[in-house]
């Protein structure tokens, strides 16, 4: 395990390139096997008390994707934040809490979601973690049993947009797209977020 330190440059690069993607190449599909691989890695991440209460539902067909898409709310800061026809995700992973195992997921779903996004990026894919979801109607449409609570939906596909990080100015947290469609995301500097203790 001594050679693990050699992975730092690769990991840092992957983490900094794993941005939220909201525009996808809808004509390029994501396979069921790819989604199964991502769920398989996510299921092996840390879990509070090792309870492992998360379950995953995957979608890669146009029919099922068309059921999921209308129940998602995209990019509050952008006027055109919702993907247009031809730019929609071609796959989804729903992260569910199994109430038969635990009443709360703690932070397990955050760990799993970020692991899925990192894995997707390592495969060349992009994704968006969505917490603004019409859970009741989506549960009904997908016939998800009551014991499973929809925690997050991860939209996935081949990226159709470029996302760049910007230094935050005057606490302006709003992200934006420029005239060429490049998506800009302001980030606070390390000097502001790292406390001097």
Image (spheres, helix red, strand yellow):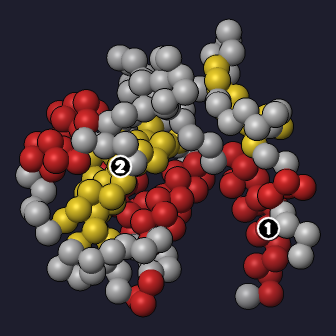
- Measured as percent of width and height from the top left, residue 4 is found at 76, 79
Q: Residue 114: percent from the left, percent from the top?
A: 53, 59
Q: Are marks 2 and 1 in contact (CB under 8 Å)?
A: no
SS class of the residue under badge 1? helix
How far apart marks 2 and 1 lie (CA) works out to 29 Å
Work out whether residue 62 can be spotted: no
Task: Kindly identify the residue that appears in the image at 91 percent across and 69 percent down.
Answer: 196
User: Around disc 2, counting alpha carbons within 10 Å, would you say few (fewer than 14), some (14 to 19), or many (20 or more)?
Assistant: many
Q: Is residue 23 above or below residue 67?
A: above
Q: Is residue 45 visible?
A: yes
Quadrant, the N terminus: bottom right
Numbered mark located on residue 196 in the image: none
Residue 14, compared with residue 158, is above or below; it is below
**Residue at the outermost front position:** 170
Seen in the image, is 93 located left or right of residue 20?
Answer: left
Q: Earlier in the sequence, mark 2 or mark 1?
A: 1
Query: Would you name the residue on which mark 2 appears?
Result: 153
Q: Spot the residue most to the top.
A: 179
The picture places residue 190, in percent across and down from the top left corner, at: 85, 55
Q: Residue at x 49, y 43 (%)?
A: 127
Say whether residue 2 is left or right of residue 179.
Answer: right
Q: Position of residue 16 (x, y in %)?
A: 72, 49
Q: Is residue 189 left or right of residue 136?
A: right
Task: Residue at 50% x, 80% y: name it.
Answer: 46
Instruction: Identify the residue at image location x=15%, y=42%.
Output: 137
Disc on res. 8: 1
Mark 2 element type: strand
* Nearer to the camera, 179 or 188: 188
| Residue 172 versus residue 37 in the image, above or below | above
């Amino acid at each position: 395990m001594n050679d693990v330190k050699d992975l730092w440059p690769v990991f840092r690069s992957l983490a900094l390139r794993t941005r939220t993607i909201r525009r996808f190449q809808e004509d390029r599909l994501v396979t069921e096997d790819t989604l199964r691989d991502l769920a398989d890695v996510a299921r092996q991440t840390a879990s509070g008390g090792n309870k492992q209460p998360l379950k995953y539902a995957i979608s890669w067909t146009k029919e099922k994707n068309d059921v999921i898409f209308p129940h998602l709310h995209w990019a509050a800061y952008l006027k055109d934040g919702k993907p247009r026809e031809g730019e929609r995700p071609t796959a989804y992973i729903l992260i569910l809490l199994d109430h038969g195992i635990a009443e709360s997921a703690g932070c397990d779903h955050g760990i799993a979601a970020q692991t899925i996004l990192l894995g997707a990026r390592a495969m060349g894919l992009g994704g968006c973690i969505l917490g603004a979801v019409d859970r009741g109607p989506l549960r009904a449409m997908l016939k998800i049993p009551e014991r499973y609570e929809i925690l997050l939906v991860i939209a996935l596909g081949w990226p159709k947009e470029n996302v760049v990080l910007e230094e935050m100015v005057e606490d302006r947290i709003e992200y934006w797209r420029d005239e060429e469609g490049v998506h800009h995301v302001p980030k606070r500097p390390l000097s502001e977020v790292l406390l001097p203790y």
